[in-house]
Image (spheres, rainbow, N blue to C red):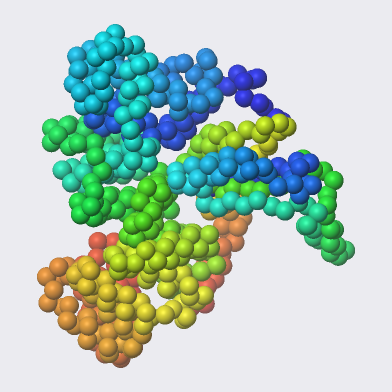
Amino acid sequence: MRFIAMVHADERSEAGEMPTEQELAAMGAFNEELVKAGVMLAGEGLHPSSRGARVVHAAGGTTVLDGPFAETKELIAGFWLLEAKTYEEALEWLKRAPRPASGEFVIELRPVFEADDFGEAFTPELREQEERLRAQAERNSG
Amino acid sequence: MARPTGTSAPTPLATRRAVEAVWRIEAARLIAGLARLVRDVGQAEELAQDALVAALEQWPTDGVPDNPGAWLMAVAKRRAIDQIRRRERFERKREELGRDLDARPDSSEDDYAAVLDAAGGSIADDLLRLLFTACHPVLSTEARVALTLRVVGGLTTTEIARAFLVPEATVGQRIVRAKRTLARAGVAFEAPAGDELAARLPSVLEVVYLVFNEGYAATAGDDWMRPALCEDALRLGRILVGLMSDTSEVHGLVALMELQASRSRARTGPDGEPVLLLEQDRARWDQLLIRRGLAALARAEELGGGLGPYALQAAVAACHARARDAGQTDWPRIAALYGLLARVVPSPVVRLNRAVAVSMADGPTAGLALVDELREEPALRAYHLLPTVRGDLLAKLGRADEARAEFERAAELTANERERAVLRRRAETAAQA
């Protein structure tokens, strides 16, 4: 199962402050542990929202809002894409991420949709429609 | 809503799942570290199990400790020391470790643990030893698979049994017997070095690839534990890469698995029927796994020394992964790669694959000439793909009667009902042409 672990932004990351050498070393060691255990598929750190934008589509048209955005703690500063056996395992890995010297380091864990998850969304109506189409196709070819 | 750990009491089920998660993460390191102390994988696995049982008893009331791995190791180590003491093997152990404790005959448990800790070796070395011991050639392939998934993959006996569609007791038996075999054969807890490493690596890679294929062969209707074996194998492979990053073929195996896994979503149609590679919707291929696979293949090639069988198969898979649609496939390159593979692994099945690639690159006549060379091959006598391929090439050459005969023969040989129906239809179509 795949999971995305989103690192929330804070004042420092939004100010474009780089992590200290110590923080980088601790994060590097954690990443290495994830890679060596075979659970980390990808992971990146993001520039502050001042370097980003939001593209807003609406029925009336499309607008582009340039960053920075105000709600600092709701923003994303980085992510890991993990592959773990269970949700609990992914959670257990995140509990091992380095702790900050001060303030909070918030990581949000979310399961990624898998093909099977769409099984439920394939409603009886859709199934029926597909079967009708198939019957139609068979008549046409027969 | 935020729920900081420690402020709300987790349910027993939640704690059990957390313990299982810790086990999955820690099992290999725990067993490997313990095996270095007690010099016996079977005993190490039992000690780790006991620690797990202790965790299941204590954590629901005390909460999951801050460093669960260290907690499990401390409990297991204490038991290891108790056992060693009880069996009066302390003296021998001390000699083995080459530490002079004579000056302190009443050394405390802590001193003893410290001596064991100082006995040397990194976690990586221990894991490598564990992997090579679990995949030791004295064990049958089945035993190697079960033991590796258990001690390195951190799977429970129940999970292994469900994934391999065998009773749980069978898996339990396999593991017990494997541990006994290792003990009886006096297999040292060591990773081989030099030439022996090269000689024994294939038995490790084989186990990982076998686990992968078992998962890959699973169909959509199977219990999800079966397809999950692909992920377990990939994980084992990625761990192996971390331990043996300078070995080309290890990257080759991981490349092969990542590239094959990248197609898993496109391999079956809506009713679970298989979709052939060239007919798959390439938009459904997993681009992340493709990128990872291509990167692993590039590392295998950089390390040089000639590509091994896994890396060569990965190179073939990479040709498909790079083609935006089936028509852009680099068939001459695939044919050349199968030619190299046939030299490394002299197998008639590889030669048959090469014949198909040649027919795609140079036309059906060239392919048919190669297929005809295989007609007398005893290993392929009952292999339905030989007449299938031959029928396909004959049909393309307009030799309808011969093509029909080959498809009928293939239909008789296959064990798969769905495939038989497809082959019968092809026989009819050939006859009408």
Q: Is residue B60 above or below residue B334?
A: above
Residue A86 appears in the rendering: yes
Residue placed furthest toward the right: A60
Q: Taking the image as drawn, is residue B286 in sight?
A: no
Q: Where is B188 relative to A15, above or below?
A: above
Q: What residue lies at 62% left-to-right and 39% top-to-bottom?
A: A22
- Foreground: B155 or B123? B123
Q: Nearer the viewer, residue B84 or B388?
A: B84
Numbered circles on residues, count:
0
Q: Quadrant of residue B186?
A: top left
> Taking B355 as reference, is B246 left or right?
right
Quarter of the figure with residue B131: top left
Foreground pick, B423 / A63 = A63
Residue B344: percent from left, percent from top: 23, 69
Q: Quadrant of residue B276?
A: bottom left
Residue pushed farthest front? B103
Q: Which residue lies at the image location 30% right of the left edge and 69% below the top edge?
A: B306
**Residue B73 point in image, percent of width and height:** 40, 25
Q: Position of residue B233 (x, y in %)?
A: 37, 49
Q: Position of residue B301 (x, y in %)?
A: 38, 67
Position of residue A106 in the picture relative to residue B73 (left or right): right
At 24% across and 48% down in the image, what residue appears?
B193
At 35% across and 28% down in the image, what residue appears? Answer: B118
